Image (cartoon, rainbow, N blue to C red):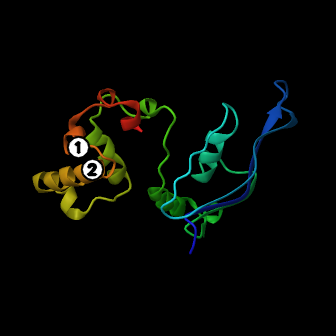
Amino acid sequence: MTPLLELRGLSKEFPIRSSFLRRRLGTVSAVNGVDLTIAQGETLALVGESGSGKSTLGRMIVRLVEPTRGEIHFRGADLLALGDRDLRRARRHFQVVFQDPYGSLNPRMRIGAVLLEPLQVHGLLSPAERKGSEGRAARISRVAAMLAEVGLPAEAAGRYPHEFSGGQRQ
């Protein structure tokens, strides 16, 4: 069976440059040779000291930071070979869980609107969900299903981020 995510020899080096003339003086190795396989349905917790490369690794997986070396395969597809359009399509299947979830949520938006926004941005609402008042009921139902999937009641859609615990925000 094809793994959900597979990393082989993933590394990231950042250049050290002089402040004068911006000459390259050397490199800092942020991530060095990570090999990792995650099967469908598995969960992985990445734990380490501050500055150990956890966030850099996550950013490389979703290609917000390009690796210096290595391979990234998601459901068998080589993510490093994808062009912009295909990468955007693949990103629909990713979700980054930030260490500070409150910092990534708009405090002025209710959670229902926060959950709908990526569906709208990526064009993932059905034609029925896009239509005015008829679509409103379908959108409410879709948000309620997403909340139920993570153990939250449908009423949570009307709450603001500050009304949730840290774990609920994640």
Q: Amino acid at mark 2?
A: Ala
The single residue placed furthest to the left in the displayed view is 133
Say left or right for 142 vs 27: left
Q: Give me the residue at 29% from left, 38% from top.
A: 111
Q: Could you classify mark 1 by the number of other residues whose Cα lies within 10 Å: few (under 14), some (14-19), or many (20 or more)?
A: few
Identify the image quadrant of residue 101.
top left
Q: Quadrant of the C terminus?
A: top left
Measuring from the top left, give residue 137's x and y in whole percent: 14, 53
Of the image marks 2 and 1, the number of the one nearer the N terminus: 2
Query: Residue 162 is drawn in which quadrant?
Result: top left
Q: Residue furthest right?
A: 25
The residue at which mark 2 appears reads as: 148
Residue 105 or residue 24, whichever sits in front: 105
Q: Are marks 2 and 1 in contact (CB under 8 Å)?
A: yes
Taking the spot 32% from the left edge, 41% from the top edge, the residue there is: 114
- Image point (58%, 67%), residue name: 3
Where is residue 34 shown, x and y percent of the image? 72, 52
Residue placed most toward the observer, 167 or 143: 167
Instruction: From this view, report whether residue 83 is shown above or below residue 62.
Output: below
Q: Quadrant of the N terminus?
A: bottom right
Residue 3 numbered mark, or none:
none
Q: Is residue 5 left or right of residue 70?
A: left
Label 2: how many Cα within 10 Å (few below 14, some 14–19, many 20+) = few
- Judged from the image, the secondary structure of the residue bearing numbered disc 1 is loop
Name, please, the residue furthest toward the bottom. Answer: 1
Q: Position of residue 53 (x, y in %)?
A: 68, 40
Kind of residue indicated by mark 1: Pro
Q: Is residue 17 left or right of residue 109?
A: right
Q: Could you tell me which secondary element the residue under label 2 belongs to?
A: helix
User: In the drawing, what numbered circle is on residue 153?
Assistant: 1
The image position of residue 160, as x and y in percent, is 28, 31
State the CA–CA distance, disc 2 to disc 1: 6 Å
